[in-house]
Amino acid sequence: MSITDEGEYGQKQIDFLELIWGKGFLSPGGTTEVDLVIEGLDLSGLNILDIGCGCGGAVFHLIEQHGAATAIGVDIEPLVISRAKALADEYNLNDKASFEVVTPGPLPFSDMQFDMVFSKDAFLHIPDKESLMADIARVLKPDGIIAASDWMRLDDNPPSQVMADYIAAEGLDMHMCSLDRYSKALAAAGFSDIHRCDRNAWYLDLAQQEWKSMAAEPLRSQIIDCIGKAAADETSNIWRKMIGVLEIGEHRPGHFRAQKLR
Ligand SMILES: C[S@@+](CC[C@H](N)C(=O)[O-])C[C@H]1O[C@@H](n2cnc3c(N)ncnc32)[C@H](O)[C@@H]1O
């Protein structure tokens, strides 16, 4: 039994990823990485949309530590939204944080509704980057900001065999593209002041540490308790393949930020 057999972000996947990456997070780096994505921005009083919010870790951080007025998290997976809502209850943040299940496609929001769109490691699941950036421009106010982290690729050529093997091992619907493709999509959608940041070296180092910790106690036993031994071995194998494609530089986590022209 694989941890994606019950859905891409089913209960086992959520429990496992929160164990590795921290409460409320289904992506690496936690609040420190969120801080880097928005470094230098003043979020006080802003209304923010988080696309692919997962269990809400970034939404809570943007409100509690950066003074966002409201943050709406959207995701296509009902179980991650249930978990985000439970955490909003636990943190007593229901007045400022809200979460909605959406269907893939155009965002169910009015034009010029948000001051900022945030996203962390979710756009890789959305194939049409050009339509996505145009829709984000639509829901942003003039001068609004997009600030995102994503798992990208070195270029937009067909994946190498090792990259294809890694993506197959993940068992997720992954459409990783280059930072260049995002830059072009942002410019075409009417964004300017595009800033980019490559995070390959950072995540290569962290992923190697994660892989070692996953094989050692106490984490190994915690993972087996959470998802069973076969799935624990499978996830270790996924990390090994992921480290391989990080090492050759084809898997390139990164950040980008841009401002909507008036
Ligand atoms: C790697 S997780 C990251 C979650 C969260 N941003 C975090 O950093 O913890 C990717 C998330 O994107 C969501 N997702 C996939 N396709 C989506 C879509 N078309 N629209 C919104 N969310 C999507 C998945 O359900 C999943 O929760």
Image: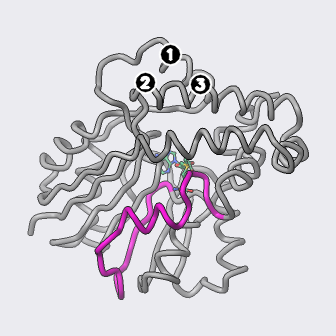
SS assignment at label 3 = helix
Circles 2, 1 touching at the beta carbon (< 8 Å): yes
- In the image, residue 9 lies in the stretch drawn in magenta: no
Residue placed under numbered mark 3 in the picture:
241
Along the horizontal axis of the image, is 120 left or right of 19? left
SS assignment at label 1 = helix
**Quadrant location of the N terminus in the rendered image:** top right
Q: Is residue 112 above or below residue 5?
A: below
Along the horizontal axis of the image, is 63 left or right of 187? right
> Mark 2 or mark 1: which is in front?
2
Identify the magenta region. Answer: 24-52
Along the horizontal axis of the image, is 155 left or right of 51? left
As shown in the figure, which amino acid type bears the numbered disc 2? Answer: Ile
The first of marks 3 and 2 along the sequence is: 3
Circles 3, 1 touching at the beta carbon (< 8 Å): yes
Q: In which quadrant of the rendered view does residue 182 lie?
A: top left
The spot of residue 253 in percent (x, y) is: 41, 43
- Mark 2 and mark 1: Cα distance apart in space: 10 Å
